[in-house]
Image: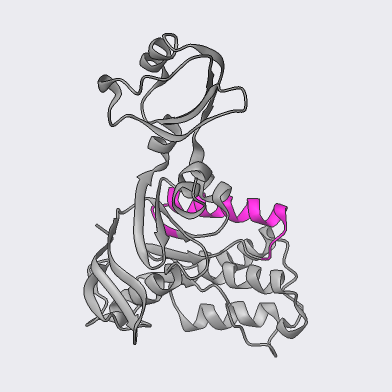
Amino acid sequence: MLVATDRLTKRYGSFTALDACSLSVHGGEVFGLLGPNGAGKTTLLRLLLGYLAPTSGSATVVGHDIATDSLGVRSKVAYLPGEARLFRRMNGREVLDFFARLRPACSRSAAGRVAERLGLDVSRQVARMSTGMRQKLALATVLATDVPLVILDEPTANLDPTARAEVLDLVREANAAGKTVIFSSHVLSEVEETCGRVAILRAGRLVHEQSIAEIRRGHRIRARLTGSFAGVPADFDGHVRIVDRRSDAAGAERLVFEAAESLAPLLGWLATLPLAEVEIEPIGLAAVYDRFHRGG
């Protein structure tokens, strides 16, 4: 495992920012980290980098213990914080020069190419850059660094749609070049498009972990029945769950199912129900996220 945490916990007095988080990130994958503000995503990332000391639990990153060898961790990681702070009196070109000199693993020529792809004017002073331009500048330094692990905290925040698409392409290219990427974001569509596996945090706890391939195999079925519903057959127990059940004004039952398996065996069962209408759609990441954060 490139990253492994074991019941990693961070408390501030009586407040628990991260609660007994155990997860693993495999080498060569793009791993998505999801959750609303305050869910614990940034706390987890800062713990992994050694910027925060854990209250309890442990973790290793690229073979280095976060508590005893944080310098070793950071030597193997390129990190984009959620709010990157850059030298305001420098221009963009000087910032790229500075980070290339500061860190040998950061290629100045590669940083320039990333900045160009993102449409960044590096001659402009940082103080006169927009928030989105500063985000592009920070991305250029991070994505030009040749390390095993890249951690991106909200990398597309404040970017226009064209730049967002370019950043996702850059993430995929970094992964194709052998880098592992942890991608923390609020934008579910970007995570679903880019990541191979996701973890969902809620109120400091890891509540769900699943591969995107498994999520895409699932389906949501909405059905209106003309008669009564006898329940899900035992053959489908554990594979089909009822997420909503109610009767409409005419007394017809309306049900919403989520199915984790392929549709073929389910269609035979659905054909036995007294269906008035049925609608089948892929579940998608948004539906899984809703289950934990929007009461879906």
Nearer-the-camera pick, 47 or 109? 47
- Quarter of the figure with the N terminus: bottom left
Total marks shown come to: 0
Quadrant of the image occupied by residue 83: bottom right
- What segment carries the magenta color? 158-182
Nearer-the-camera pick, 243 or 91? 243
In the current view of this chain or complex, which residue is farthest to the bottom? 89
Asked if the stretch drawn in magenta spans residue 136, the answer is no
How would you classify the magenta stretch by its main secondary structure? helix
* Left or right of 58 on screen, residue 139: right
134 up-or-down from 209: above or below: below
* Left or right of 145 on screen, residue 91: right
Residue 173 point in image, percent of width and height: 50, 50
Asked if the stretch drawn in magenta spans residue 162, the answer is yes
Q: Residue at x 56, y 83 (%)?
A: 98
Quadrant of the image occupied by residue 233: top left
Residue 183 point in image, percent of width and height: 47, 59
Q: Is residue 295 in view from this perspective?
A: yes
Residue 255 point in image, percent of width and height: 49, 28
